[in-house]
Image: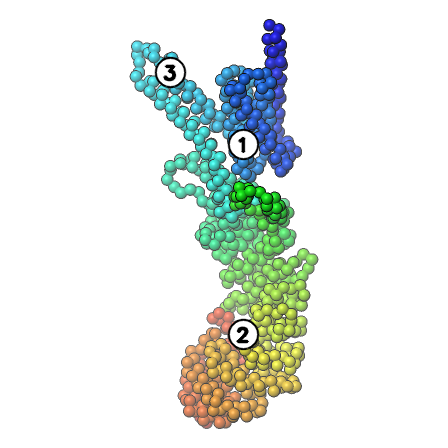
C-alpha cells in the first residue's frame, strides 16, 4: 500500500501541474488572440521570430506524435510525465502562430505542411482524451483549439464525422435502440435515419478532404504567381486574395454550376471598387502587371477604358495626396493610366483628369518610401543566390536538384524603382500618350498652368534629374509635332511662352544633357522653326546655332547619326526664308562649313546626310548669296560640288530629286564661272539631266504634298541653264520642253503655294514669283514668250 501511494503521489502532483499549466495556457492564448500586442506581433513577423515559431511547431508536432504513440509503449511514470505538458505547450505555440500575418505562413510549402500537421495532431490528441475522460477541462481545450484553427467549420466537420460514425455504428451494431419497435411502426424510419447520418458523414468527410486538399492549393497558387509575373510579398497577397475570391464565388454558385471562373483582370477590376486601401492597391498592381503582357494588354486596355467606374477610381487615385498614398497606390495608378492613355480622349474621360495628371508634376521626385520593399529585395536576392552557390559547391547531386527546384518555385524579388517611376515622369508619359490624339493636344494646351509646369521642368535644377528633363522635352516635341492646322496653332501657342526657347537653349548648352535629350531638343527646335516668329527668335540664340552646326557636322564628341540628322533638319528649317539666320550660320565656321557640306554631298560615307546637306546649302545660296561668295574659297567648293549634284540628279527620285535640282539651280545662278563646267558636260551628263527634267515635269502634273516645289525648282533650273549657257536652248527644244511648260502653265495648283506641309495642310508659304510668271520667263528666254493666264 505504501509503494502504491508513493507511485500515485507524483502522478497526482503532475496531473495538478498539467491542469494549472492548461489554465495558464488558455489565459495566455485568450489574451494574445484578443489584445494582439503590437510588439509581440512585430517580433513574430520578423525572420528571427518566424524561425523560432517554426522551431516550436516542430517540437510540438513531434511531442504530440510521441504522445499518440504512448499506448503502444510500456506505461512507466517518466514517459507519462513527459507527455503531460504537450497540450499547454501546443496551445501557446498555436497562439503565437496565429499572431503572424497570413502571408508568412505561405512563404514555403514546409511551413504550410507543418501548420496543418500540427493542427491535425492537436485535434487528434484532444479527441482521444475526450473519449477517455470527457471532462470540462478537455472540452475547453477543444473549444480553444477550434479558435486557434481559425475556422469553426473544421472542428465542426470533425465532430460531424465522429458523431455520425458513432450513430451509424449503434444503428447497425448488436445493441441499437431500434430493434424494440412499437406497435405503430414506420418501416422507413431506420433507413431514413441511416440516410441522414450517411449524408452528414459524407458532408463532413468531404469538407475535411477539401481542407486537406487545400494544402495542395499552394502548388497552383505558386504556379499562377510565377506565370503572372507577380513579384515580392504583394504578389503572394494578390494570389491569396484572388484564390479566396474564386473559392467564395464557387461556394456561392456551386462547384458544378455553369459559368466561367473569375479571371485575374476581373478580380483586379472588382478590387478597385473595394473600400479597403490594401485591396485597391492589390487591384491596381495586378492591372499594372497584366498590362505589361503584350498578349492580353489590348483587351484589358479596352475593358478599362470602357468602365467609367474604373476610370474614375484611377483618376481619383492619381489626384490623391502623399498622405493618402499608402503603399504607392498613386504611383501604380499612374502607371496603369500611362498604359491606357493612348486609347483615351480627354473630352470623354472623367472630369478633372487633366488636373489630376497635372498634380503629378508637382509631386516629389520618387515614391521610394511608399512603394514597398522593391529596392532592397533585389540586392538581398543576389547575395543569397551567390552564397547559396558557394555553399552548394561541395554538396551532392540531390542538393543541387533541390536548390534548382527551390529557385524555380521561389517568388522573384520586386525590382527597385528607378527615376522613370517618379511622379513627374509618369505625368509626362501620360500626357505624351494622350497627345497622340490632336483633340487631346488642344485640351492640354488650353490648360495654361499645365504648359507652364511642363516648360518649367525643361531646366537642370537640384530637383530636376535627367529623366524629368527628357520626359518634359519629349512631351513638348510630341505637342509641336502635331500635324495640320491644330499643330500650327499649338506651335504658335508654345512659341509665345517666354521660357521655352531659353530652356531649350540651356538644355543644348548644358554638358549634362544626354544624346537623347539633345536629339529631342533639336527635333523640337526644328518643329518650332516652322513658325516664322519662333524661327527668328531661335536664330537670335547664337548658343543654339553653334550647337546645331557643330552637331550636324560631327564636330562634337560622340555625335550619333540620329543626333546629326536632327541638328541638320533644325538648321534647314531655320534657314527657310530667313537671311538673318543664314548669316548667323555662316558666321559659325565660315568657309569650313561650305567645305564640310561639299564633303557630305560628294563622299559616299556621308550619303545618309546628303539630302539634309543639300537643303541647307540651297537655302544658304538662296538667302545669303553675297556673304557666301565673299567667303574665301567658297566659290571653289561650290564649283567642285556641281558635277556631283548633276550626276545624282539623273538617278534621284521624289524629295531627293527636288532638293538636288533646287541646289543645282542656286549654284548655277551664283556666278558665270560655271559656264565652262556646263559646256564640258553638255554631251555627257547635260543631255541626261535635260531628259530627266522634262520627264519629271511630264510625270508631275499633279503636285504632291511630299515635294510640292518639284515643278517650281525644275523651271528655275531651266532658267539657270538657259541663262548660263545658251547651248542648252536647242537641247531643251528637242526634248519638247515648250509643250511641257505649256501644260504646266495650264494646270496651276494651290499646293504649289506652300513649300512645307504638315500632314495635308501647308504651314510655310512660298515667297517666290508665281509659277506662271516663271514659265513665261523661260519661254521668253528660249524664244517663245506667249503668256498663259494664272488662276
Q: Decide: marks 2, 1 in contact (CB < 8 A)?
A: no
Please indicate, yes or no, whether residue 778 appears anywhere in the rendered image. Answer: no
In this rendering, the answer to whether 629 lies above or below 158 is below
SS type, badge 2: helix
Task: Report x, y in % for residue 329.
Answer: 57, 47
Residue ID for mark 1 = 115
Q: Quadrant of the N terminus?
A: top right
Residue ID for mark 2 = 608
**Mark with earlier residue (1, 3):** 1
Q: Residue at x 36, y 20 (%)?
A: 193
Between 303 and 90, the one nearer to me in the picture: 90
**Mark with earlier residue (2, 1):** 1
Q: Residue at x 61, y 47 (%)?
A: 386
**Mark with earlier residue (2, 3):** 3
Task: Report x, y in % for residue 534.
Answer: 60, 71
Mark 2 and mark 1: span between their CA atoms? 69 Å
Label 2 or label 3, whichever lies nearer to me, is: 3
In this rendering, the answer to whether 391 lies above or below 563 is above
Between 441 and 175, the one nearer to me in the picture: 175
Other residues around mark 1 within 10 Å, as few (<14) / some (14–19) / many (≥20): many
Q: Decide: marks 1, 3 in contact (CB < 8 A)?
A: no
In this rendering, the answer to whether 642 lies above or below 238 is below
Left or right, residue 256 beside residue 243: left
Residue found at the far top of this picture? 1
Between 595 and 535, the one nearer to me in the picture: 595
User: Where, by quadrant of the figure, is residue 559 drawn?
Assistant: bottom right
Mark 2 and mark 3: span between their CA atoms? 99 Å
In this rendering, the answer to whether 174 lies above or below 744 is above
Q: Residue at x 60, y 32 (%)?
A: 55
Task: Report x, y in % for residue 588.
Answer: 66, 77
Residue ID for mark 3 = 173
Residue found at the far right of this picture? 462
Amino acid at each position: 500500500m505504501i509503494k502504491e501511494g508513493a507511485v500515485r503521489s507524483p502522478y497526482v502532483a503532475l496531473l495538478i501541474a498539467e491542469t494549472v499549466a492548461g489554465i495558464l495556457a488558455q489565459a495566455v492564448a485568450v489574451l494574445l488572440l484578443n489584445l494582439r500586442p503590437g510588439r509581440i506581433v512585430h517580433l513574430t513577423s520578423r525572420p528571427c521570430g518566424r524561425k523560432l515559431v517554426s522551431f516550436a511547431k516542430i517540437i510540438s508536432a513531434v511531442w504530440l506524435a510521441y504522445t499518440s504513440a504512448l499506448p503502444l509503449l510500456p506505461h512507466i511514470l517518466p514517459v507519462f510525465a513527459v507527455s503531460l505538458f504537450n497540450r499547454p505547450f501546443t496551445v501557446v505555440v498555436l497562439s503565437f502562430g496565429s499572431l503572424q500575418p497570413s502571408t508568412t505562413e505561405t512563404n514555403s510549402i514546409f511551413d504550410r505542411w507543418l501548420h496543418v500537421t500540427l493542427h491535425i495532431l492537436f485535434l487528434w490528441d484532444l479527441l482521444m482524451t475526450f473519449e477517455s475522460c470527457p471532462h470540462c477541462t478537455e472540452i475547453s481545450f477543444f473549444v480553444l483549439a477550434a479558435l486557434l484553427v481559425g475556422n469553426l467549420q473544421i472542428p465542426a466537420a470533425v465532430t460531424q464525422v465522429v458523431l455520425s460514425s458513432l450513430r451509424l455504428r449503434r444503428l447497425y451494431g448488436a445493441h441499437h435502440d431500434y430493434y424494440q419497435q412499437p406497435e405503430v411502426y414506420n418501416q422507413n424510419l431506420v433507413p431514413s435515419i441511416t440516410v441522414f447520418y450517411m449524408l452528414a458523414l459524407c458532408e463532413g468527410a468531404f469538407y475535411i478532404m477539401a481542407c486537406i486538399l487545400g494544402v495542395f492549393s499552394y502548388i497552383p497558387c505558386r504556379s499562377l504567381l510565377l506565370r503572372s509575373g507577380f513579384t515580392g510579398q504583394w504578389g503572394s497577397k494578390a494570389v491569396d486574395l484572388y484564390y479566396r475570391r474564386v473559392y467564395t464565388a464557387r461556394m456561392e454558385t456551386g462547384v458544378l454550376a455553369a459559368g466561367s471562373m473569375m479571371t485575374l483582370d476581373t478580380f483586379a477590376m472588382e478590387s478597385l471598387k473595394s473600400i479597403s486601401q490594401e485591396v485597391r492597391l492589390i487591384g491596381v498592381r495586378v492591372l499594372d502587371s497584366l498590362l505589361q503582357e503584350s498578349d492580353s494588354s489590348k483587351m484589358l486596355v479596352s475593358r478599362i477604358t470602357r468602365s467609367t467606374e474604373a476610370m474614375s477610381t484611377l483618376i481619383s487615385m492619381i489626384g490623391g495626396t502623399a498622405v493618402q498614398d499608402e503603399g504607392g497606390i498613386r504611383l501604380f495608378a499612374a502607371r496603369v493610366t500611362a498604359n491606357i492613355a493612348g486609347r483615351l480622349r480627354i473630352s470623354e474621360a472623367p472630369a478633372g483628369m487633366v488636373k489630376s495628371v497635372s498634380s503629378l508634376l508637382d509631386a516629389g521626385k520618387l515614391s521610394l518610401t511608399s512603394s514597398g520593399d522593391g529596392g532592397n529585395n533585389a540586392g538581398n536576392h543576389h547575395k543569397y543566390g551567390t552564397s547559396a552557390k558557394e555553399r552548394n559547391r561541395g554538396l551532392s547531386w540531390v542538393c543541387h536538384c533541390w536548390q534548382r527546384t527551390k529557385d524555380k518555385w521561389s517568388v522573384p524579388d520586386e525590382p527597385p524603382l528607378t527615376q522613370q517611376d517618379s511622379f513627374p515622369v509618369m505625368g509626362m508619359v501620360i500626357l505624351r500618350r494622350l497627345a497622340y490624339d490632336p483633340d487631346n493636344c488642344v485640351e492640354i494646351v488650353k490648360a495654361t498652368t499645365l504648359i507652364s509646369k511642363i516648360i518649367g521642368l525643361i531646366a537642370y535644377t537640384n530637383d530636376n534629374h535627367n529623366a524629368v528633363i527628357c520626359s518634359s522635352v519629349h512631351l513638348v516635341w510630341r505637342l509641336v509635332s502635331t500635324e495640320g492646322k491644330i499643330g500650327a496653332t499649338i506651335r504658335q501657342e508654345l512659341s509665345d511662352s517666354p521660357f521655352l526657347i531659353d530652356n531649350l537653349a540651356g538644355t543644348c548648352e548644358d554638358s549634362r544633357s544626354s544624346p537623347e535629350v539633345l536629339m529631342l531638343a533639336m527635333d523640337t527646335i526644328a518643329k518650332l522653326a516652322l513658325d516664322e516668329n519662333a524661327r527668328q527668335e531661335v536664330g537670335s540664340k547664337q548658343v543654339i546655332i553653334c550647337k546645331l552646326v557643330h552637331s550636324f557636322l560631327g564636330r562634337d564628341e560622340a555625335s550619333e547619326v540620329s543626333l546629326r540628322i536632327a541638328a541638320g533638319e533644325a538648321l534647314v528649317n531655320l534657314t527657310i526664308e530667313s537671311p538673318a539666320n543664314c548669316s548667323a550660320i555662316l558666321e559659325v565656321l565660315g568657309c569650313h562649313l561650305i567645305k564640310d557640306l561639299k564633303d557630305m554631298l560628294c563622299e559616299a560615307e556621308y550619303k545618309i546626310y546628303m539630302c539634309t546637306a543639300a537643303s541647307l546649302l540651297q537655302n544658304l545660296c538662296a538667302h545669303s548669296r553675297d556673304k557666301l561668295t565673299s567667303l574665301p574659297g567658297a566659290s571653289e567648293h561650290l564649283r567642285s560640288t556641281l558635277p556631283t549634284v548633276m550626276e545624282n540628279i539623273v538617278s534621284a527620285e521624289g524629295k531627293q530629286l527636288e532638293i538636288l535640282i533646287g541646289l543645282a539651280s542656286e549654284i548655277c545662278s551664283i556666278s558665270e564661272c560655271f559656264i565652262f563646267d556646263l559646256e564640258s558636260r553638255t554631251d555627257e551628263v547635260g543631255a541626261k539631266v535635260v531628259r530627266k527634267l522634262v520627264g519629271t515635269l511630264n510625270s508631275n502634273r499633279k503636285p504632291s504634298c511630299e515635294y510640292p516645289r518639284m515643278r517650281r525648282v525644275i523651271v528655275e533650273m531651266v532658267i539657270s541653264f538657259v541663262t548660263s549657257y545658251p547651248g542648252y536652248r536647242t537641247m531643251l527644244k528637242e526634248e519638247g520642253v515648250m509643250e511641257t511648260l505649256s501644260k504646266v502653265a495650264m494646270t496651276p495648283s494651290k499646293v504649289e503655294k506652300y513649300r512645307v506641309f504638315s500632314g495635308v495642310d501647308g504651314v510655310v508659304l512660298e515667297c517666290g514669283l508665281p509659277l506662271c510668271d516663271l514659265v513665261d520667263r523661260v519661254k521668253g528666254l528660249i524664244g517663245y514668250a506667249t503668256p498663259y493666264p494664272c488662276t
